[in-house]
Each structure stands twice: as structure tokens, then as C-alpha cells.
Image (cartoon, helix red, strand yellow):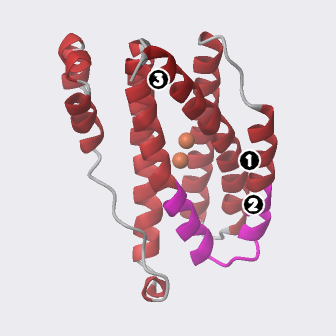
Amino acid sequence: MDGDSARALFVGVLRHAHAGELAAGHAYRGHAASVSDPEEKARIRKIEDEEWVHRKQVGEMLAAMGEAPDPVLERKFLWIGKTIAILCRVGGWYVPMYGAGRLESHNVKEYEDGADFAVACGHPEFVECLLEMAEVEWEHEAYFRSNVESHWFRHVIPVWPAIPPKDEIRRSFAARNPAFADSERAPLAGRAV
Ligand SMILES: [Fe+2]
Ligand SMILES: [Fe+2]
């Protein structure tokens, strides 16, 4: 892949993620309001906070690239997030937990792809932040999966396919990007995963 193609793919991932985090932030605000258990409410609020942090970080990456969010995607995902927030109030307990976990499993991959494209287009400075975001999305997926797997309704709607273990995020990134892993061996190897 040439640098221009990688750059276009990287910017595309960032724009999609930036809008996706907007949808996630609004959806989790509604989700937190819809649950009655205080522990669940607190955990979902923390997840919402983490999505706003991600949106800020992705926005900063776009700005550093001399790019901007896509206004069409932003409007579309704002509408999606607010719609999900409303649906959480009528969807019971299981469906919002299920929907969130399924979406989170895709978010891990999105930030892994972003890290690969960042290297390919000559922006290794974004890799650490992107891998950290992938790890936080992994934790979100694990939380919703554990909730779904504790509920009898999993026999009616099967749980989405399992994703690889958390430490596979950095191991597979290093395998796909050996030159980067060699040059950045200390930070990659030094992190607790
Ligand atoms: Fe996120
Ligand atoms: Fe998330």
C-alpha cells in the first residue's frame, strides 16, 4: 500500500471513529439513564466518559493531520446515538446490553486498523494512543459480554462471536508491523496488557 492510499484510509477511519464516538456518547447517556442498578449505571457512565475522551483524542489526530471531521457522518451518527438513547428506555435490559457489546467488538478492530494505517502513512506518533483506545474498547466489550452471558435471554439471542484476548491487540499489531515494533520495542514491550 502506498503512503497516499494509507493516509486516505487512516483519515477515513478517524472520521468514522470520531462520528462513532459521538453516537456512542449519546447512546450510553441514554443507556445509563435506563438502568436501575447503581453499579451498572456508574459503569455505563464511566464508559460514556471514556467515549468522549476518545472523540477528543481522535479529533486531535484529525487536526494534527490537517483534516476535519466529516459533517455528514457527524449528523448521521448524532441521529443514531440519540435514537439509541431513546430506544434504551423501551428496550428493556438485555437488548441495549447486547447491542452495546456487539458494537464495541467492532470498535476494537477499528482502532487496530487505525494503528496499522498510521504506521503505513508515516504517523507512528499516533500508534500508542490508538492501541490504548482499542484496549479500552476491549474492556467495554468484555463488560457488556459478561452482562449478556449472565442473562437467560442469551439462549434466545446468541452472544456475538468472541473477540481475541486483550493482549492480542499489541501482539498482533507488533506482528503486522515488525519494523515499527523493533524501533519502538521499549514502549510496546514495557506496557502491562
Ligand atoms: Fe470509544
Ligand atoms: Fe466503547
Residue at 67%, 79% (x, y): give it: 92
Q: Which mark is residue 77?
A: 1
- Are circles 2 and 1 on residues that touch, CB within 8 Å? no
Q: Position of residue 156 (x, y in %)?
A: 48, 89
- Are circles 3 and 2 on residues that touch, CB within 8 Å? no
Residue at 74%, 31% (x, y): give it: 70
Asked whether residue 143 appears in the rendered view, the answer is yes
Q: Which mark is residue 6?
A: 3
Q: Which residues are magenta?
A: 82-103
Q: Is residue 6 magenta?
A: no
Q: Which mark is residue 153?
A: none
71 and 166: which is toward the camera: 71
Is residue 177 left or right of 136 when viewed as pictured?
Answer: left
Spatial separation of the CA atoms under disc 1 and disc 3 = 24 Å
Give the SS element for disc 1.
Answer: helix
167 and 160: which is toward the camera: 160
Q: On the rendered image, what quadrant is the C terminus found in?
A: top left
Mark toward the start of the polypeptide (3 vs 2): 3
Q: Residues within 10 Å of mark 3 (few under 14, many from 20)?
A: some
Q: Amino acid at mark 3?
A: Ala
Q: Position of residue 37 (x, y in %)?
A: 60, 69
Is residue 29 left or right of 182 when viewed as pictured?
Answer: right
Q: Amino acid at mark 1?
A: Phe
Q: On the rendered image, what quadrant is the N terminus found in?
A: top left
Q: Which mark is residue 85?
A: 2
Q: Nearer the viewer, mark 3 or mark 2?
A: 3
